């Protein structure tokens, strides 16, 4: 674990610690007021043996803003940024254009440096934003109620499974083979500790998702069926028939969406009968950020399930003068009130990411959302056609939105590594997602968004031609 | 130019003039708009926008284009209102002005560590090599990102004196869960099924919720009259059914647990593990290492001690430092540096090679809160080992200054027993008839402050927990103390104008009962 950090990362030791306003003079005056002879008197409860005498050795001393920025820039430059490559990665995280005003608004100090809105009289900005955010997510998902957000899509997915257990009082979750394998892994990890049974499967590498196989696994003990839409291979399962089959056995359908932009073009999971809809909101407003912070979305189709939901909820009310206002509500579900009987141990939401999502969604509106989705789909269709024409490349999917699976005559993981050295980030290989499954090694997930240019598509096709011929 | 306004145009809205009777804000007359100068009302997006309005510039949809949506094409409107860019910027700017924030003033929220958020952190997090990289890029294209994670991990290990760190947990409560799951995995690995986790009554609500989630029964740890863990009572309760204890140190009364090492030794002797809630690490960073006190697992809220922004309720970030006994069970993925200097990403496929096949699983899809890691590392490098020590000293000094400035007007239950750590605790004893901690808190709003943490910890009646942090100047503290004293004196004198405070905020007291009784959780058009 050793790491070489220079003693001072700047050229020279700087005098001032720029984030600490107390002067030595202030400190002496304050100690005198307190009646302590030195600051060590204030640490008197810390046993002598445990007290450190000076700054921790082997860590650097304080450094100037200029020096720190330089150090971090050096680390930043060791990464290949998506903007500097022909970029086709997806698999749960998508690169979209974020309007400049989004980042401006989330950097306003009144949003950035506010706390959780527990004092609603001076937090109406955050609260109204959350109320609007909940409304936007509910509409996008075709649901009655959405919460104020979760950590990310994968943790929201687990929370949905746990909630389905509370609603149905059953403990067996049936997971579609085409759920993102990392999401499946999170669900299985959590279930190990709660005693839930997780019936998972591997995806079938076919043009169509295997709905019949999934439906056959639902039984009378099943609490929920978890289906990704679009699925990990980019295909669009018909949720309606899965919902019917689940409901016939008394189970809930949990729909998982990792690409909210798709919902500008395809039917919402709620209107197809999903009972709980969860997903990753990162595509809208948040950015790639190497995997976090992201934005977990969580909604229920029927209001009757609201009291079993995890996480914060913002609701409308009035103030003492009768004016409309907003508060966090139904907190008797939450850990700070219910303690060990809470619906979840979650405390934080992804407030600032929810703000970014909400601002971007407001800029898009219904019209922009549909246009954005159409443009993603148009470019994805072009890319699929052009790739299909490359010898040694076959398109798997019958249906897709902006991401599809191609099968290469070669090891896709090795090829993506080689292409990355040429400035082409070709996609996520199935070998990366399912390293233990040799039969998947030819698979490559290719995602195309409005940021992809036709030149990028040409570059990918010609690079693949070079590797596969 | 023809004659102006030949058509005789008049505004269509009826004339609306505020009544000269009645009063508006600050005793002045009411206004027509309901706005009061810079205090501006703002409607919901759904009331001002339309589904036809957009603030982005995208190509028109070609409705003849073929689609490959497999029959799933959307055919219904979903009713998302849009705004143009100028309207959007104005909407959110107006909303922002209804928020209190650290940038506006002292934010004395005990246990939450609302310190200044340096803007260099924001600048660094937005560097394209951090902000614009995908979590599943080939690892050779993200070595710098892995180095950031690893460098931060080393800082956390050295600052805490622990053996390893799980970086992926997304927030404090997620980190608690990670730590407790490590404990359970370690116990299961030795075939030791234990049922109970001991948690003091003064703990954060997340502690018992986490233990219960992990399948444990929660029992109280008794406290002494001095607000600390009762070591002798704890020792009596320990036994083969106790998996571990969850202790906050410094505790939620703002006091250091002087017996921490003895507590850890007793728990270890009984075969259990020690979880420490790291929410209050700001008081001791650079002064004491939890590893030296026998702690087995502790989460670190990067958004508290290490200055990443709270953002109105997240995102947080909660890496968990682990002792040697728990390290093998930490979740995937994580980073590891080999002797050749290369930082590797350790996931399911190569966990064996990194001697980590006992990992209890995966807690989140990707690598954790990268955007918070870059900010926290920037902050650590800025302060350095010497600066972080100064952070703890100044935070503790500021809290004691407030404690001593207030103890003659407010009940301070533990003040007599000695100094506090980074937060000062008060109770509501001696308040006038009908007045409560809530009323005092709302009175502080009128004075221009965010209230302190209220009614927590539960062990003190009407608790008020005040944490100023180290980023306040003496002048700012003096001004706060003046306001706090005056409101406290009003509460004790029974000043009933406090019962209806705040009087000058964008809203007066909100009806929380109504909100819960008739939940309205999203916009619906007029019913």
Image (cartoon, coloured by chain):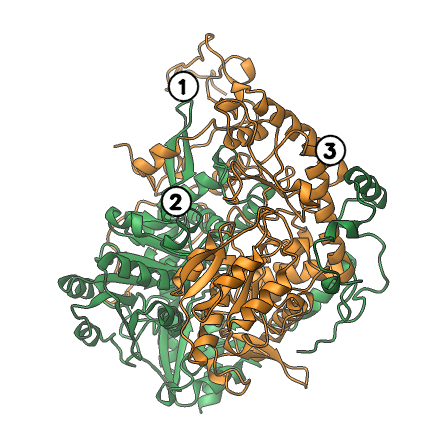
Few, some or many residues within 10 Å of mark 2 (<14, 14–19, 20+): some
A210 over B7 or under it: above or below: below
Work out which quarter of the rendered image holds the C terminus of chain A and state it.
bottom left
Instruction: Provide the residue designation for mark 2.
Output: A331
In the picture, measured across the screen, residue B123 lies left or right of residue B436, that is right
Distance of label 3 from label 2 (alpha carbons):
35 Å
Q: CA distance from mark 2 to mark 1?
A: 46 Å
| Residue A255 occupies quadrant | bottom left
Q: Given the current orientation, which residue lies at the most extreme left position?
A: A248
Residue B11: mark: 1
Name the N-terminal-most of marks 1 and 3.
1
Mark 1 neighbour density, 10 Å: few (under 14) some (14–19) many (20 or more): few
Please tell me the colour of chain A.
Answer: green
Badge 2 and badge 1 both on one subunit: no
Image vertical order of residue A370 relative to residue B416, above or below: below
The numbered disc on residue B478 is 3
Task: Name the residue: 74% across, 53% down.
Answer: A44
Kindly check if marks 2 and 1 are in contact, taking CB atoms under 8 A apart as contact: no
Residue placed most toward the observer, B55 or A302: A302
* Coordinates of residue A252 in the picture (x, y in percent): 23, 61
Q: Residue at x 59, y 22 (%)?
A: B490
Pick whichever, B499 or B248, lies toward us: B248
Secondary structure of the residue carrying tag 2 is: helix
- Report the front residue among B353 and B63: B353
* Quadrant housing the N terminus of chain A: bottom right
Chain letter of the residue carrying label 1:
B
Q: Is residue A447 left or right of residue B411?
A: left
Q: Position of residue A140 (x, y in %)?
A: 33, 52
Q: Dot 3: few (<14), some (14–19), or many (≥20) neighbours within 10 Å?
A: some
């Amino acid at each position: 674990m050793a790491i070489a950090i220079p003693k001072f990362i700047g050229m020279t030791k700087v005098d001032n610690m720029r984030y600490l306003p107390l002067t030595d003079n202030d400190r002496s005056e304050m100690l005198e007021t307190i009646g302590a002879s030195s600051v060590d008197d204030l640490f008197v409860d810390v046993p002598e043996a445990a007290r450190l005498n000076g700054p921790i050795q082997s860590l650097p001393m304080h450094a100037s803003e200029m020096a720190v920025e330089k150090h971090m820039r050096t680390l930043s430059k060791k990464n290949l940024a998506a903007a500097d490559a022909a970029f086709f990665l997806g698999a749960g995280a998508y690169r979209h254009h974020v309007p400049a005003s989004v980042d401006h608004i989330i950097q306003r100090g009144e949003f950035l440096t506010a706390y959780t809105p527990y004092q609603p009289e001076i937090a109406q900005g955050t609260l109204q934003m959350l109320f609007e955010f909940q409304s936007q997510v509910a509409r996008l998902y075709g649901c009655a109620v959405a919460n104020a957000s979760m950590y990310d899509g994968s943790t929201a997915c687990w929370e949905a499974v746990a909630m389905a257990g509370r609603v149905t009082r059953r403990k067996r979750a049936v997971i579609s083979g085409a759920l993102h394998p990392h999401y499946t892994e999170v669900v299985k990890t959590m279930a190990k500790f709660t005693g839930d049974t997780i019936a998972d499967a591997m995806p079938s590498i076919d043009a169509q998702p295997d709905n019949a196989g999934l439906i056959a696994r639902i039984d009378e003990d099943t609490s929920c069926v978890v289906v990704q839409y679009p699925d990990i291979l980019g295909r669009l399962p018909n949720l309606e028939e899965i919902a019917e089959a689940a409901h016939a056995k008394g189970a809930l359908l949990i729909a998982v969406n990792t690409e909210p932009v798709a919902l500008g073009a395809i039917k919402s999971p709620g209107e197809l009968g999903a009972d709980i809809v969860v997903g990753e909101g990162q595509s809208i407003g948040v950015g790639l950020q190497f995997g976090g912070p992201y934005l977990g979305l969580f909604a229920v189709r029927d209001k009757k399930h609201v009291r079993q939901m995890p996480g914060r909820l913002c609701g409308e009310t009035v103030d003492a003068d009768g004016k409309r206002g907003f508060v966090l509500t139904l907190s008797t579900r939450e850990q700070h009130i219910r303690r060990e009987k809470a619906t979840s141990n979650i405390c934080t939401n992804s407030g600032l990411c929810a703000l970014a999502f909400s601002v971007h969604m407001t800029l898009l509106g219904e019209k922009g959302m549909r246009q954005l989705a159409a443009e993603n789909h148009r470019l994805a269709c072009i890319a699929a056609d052009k790739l299909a024409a490359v010898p040694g490349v076959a398109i798997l999917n019958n249906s897709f939105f902006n991401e599809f699976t191609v099968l290469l005559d070669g090891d896709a993981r090795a090829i993506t590594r080689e292409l990355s050295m040429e400035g082409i980030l070709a996609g996520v290989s199935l070998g990366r997602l399912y390293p233990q499954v040799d039969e998947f090694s030819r698979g490559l997930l290719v995602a195309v968004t409005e940021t992809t240019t036709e030149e990028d598509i040409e570059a990918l096709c010609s690079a693949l031609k070079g590797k596969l011929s | 130019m023809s004659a102006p306004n030949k058509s005789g145009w008049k505004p269509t809205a009826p004339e609306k003039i505020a009544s000269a009777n009645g009063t508006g804000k600050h005793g002045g007359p009411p206004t027509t708009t309901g706005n009061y100068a810079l205090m501006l009302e703002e409607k919901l997006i759904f009331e001002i926008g339309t589904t036809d309005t957009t603030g982005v510039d995208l190509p028109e949809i070609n409705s003849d284009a073929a689609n490959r949506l497999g029959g799933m094409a959307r055919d219904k409107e979903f009713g998302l209102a849009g705004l143009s860019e100028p309207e959007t910027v104005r909407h959110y700017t107006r909303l922002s002005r209804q928020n209190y924030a650290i940038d506006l003033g002292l934010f004395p929220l005990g246990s939450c560590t609302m310190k200044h958020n340096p803007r260099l952190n924001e600048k660094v997090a937005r560097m394209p090599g951090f902000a614009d990289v995908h979590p599943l890029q080939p690892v050779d294209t993200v070595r710098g990102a892995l180095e950031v994670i690893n460098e931060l991990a080393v800082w956390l290990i050295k600052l805490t004196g622990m053996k390893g760190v799980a970086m992926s947990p997304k927030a404090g409560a997620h980190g608690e869960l990670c730590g407790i799951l490590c404990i359970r995995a370690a116990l299961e690995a030795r075939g030791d099924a234990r049922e109970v986790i001991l948690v003091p009554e003064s703990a954060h609500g997340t502690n018992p919720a986490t233990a219960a989630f992990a399948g444990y029964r929660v029992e109280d740890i008794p406290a002494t009259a001095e607000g600390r863990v009762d070591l002798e009572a704890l020792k009596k309760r320990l036994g083969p059914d106790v998996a571990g204890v969850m202790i906050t140190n410094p505790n939620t009364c703002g006091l250091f647990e002087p017996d921490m090492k003895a507590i850890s030794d007793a728990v270890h002797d009984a075969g259990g593990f020690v979880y420490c809630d790291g929410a209050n690490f700001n008081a001791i960073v650079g002064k004491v290492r939890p590893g030296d006190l026998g702690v087995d697992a502790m989460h670190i809220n990067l958004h508290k001690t290490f200055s990443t922004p709270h953002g109105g309720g997240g995102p947080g970030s909660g890496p968990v430092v682990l002792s040697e006994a728990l390290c093998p069970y930490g979740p995937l993925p994580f980073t590891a540096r080999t002797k050749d200097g290369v930082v590797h990403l350790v996931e399911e496929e190569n966990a064996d090679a990194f001697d980590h096949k006992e990992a209890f699983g995966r807690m989140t899809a990707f690598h954790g809160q990268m955007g918070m890691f870059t900010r926290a590392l920037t902050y650590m490098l800025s302060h350095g080992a010497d600066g972080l020590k100064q952070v703890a000293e100044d935070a503790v000094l500021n809290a004691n200054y407030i404690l001593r400035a207030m103890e003659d007007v407010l009940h301070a239950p533990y003040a007599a027993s000695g100094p506090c750590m980074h937060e000062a605790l008060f109770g509501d004893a001696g308040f006038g008839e009908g007045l409560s901690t809530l009323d005092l808190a709302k009175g502080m709003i009128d004075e221009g402050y965010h209230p302190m943490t209220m009614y927590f910890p539960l062990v003190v009646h009407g608790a008020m927990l005040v944490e100023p942090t180290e980023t306040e100047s003496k002048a700012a503290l003096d001004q706060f103390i003046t306001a706090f004293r005056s409101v406290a004196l009003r509460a004790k004198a029974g000043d009933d104008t406090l019962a209806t405070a705040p009087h000058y905020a964008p809203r007066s007291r909100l009806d929380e009962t109504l909100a819960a009784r008739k939940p309205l959780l999203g916009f619906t058009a007029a019913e």
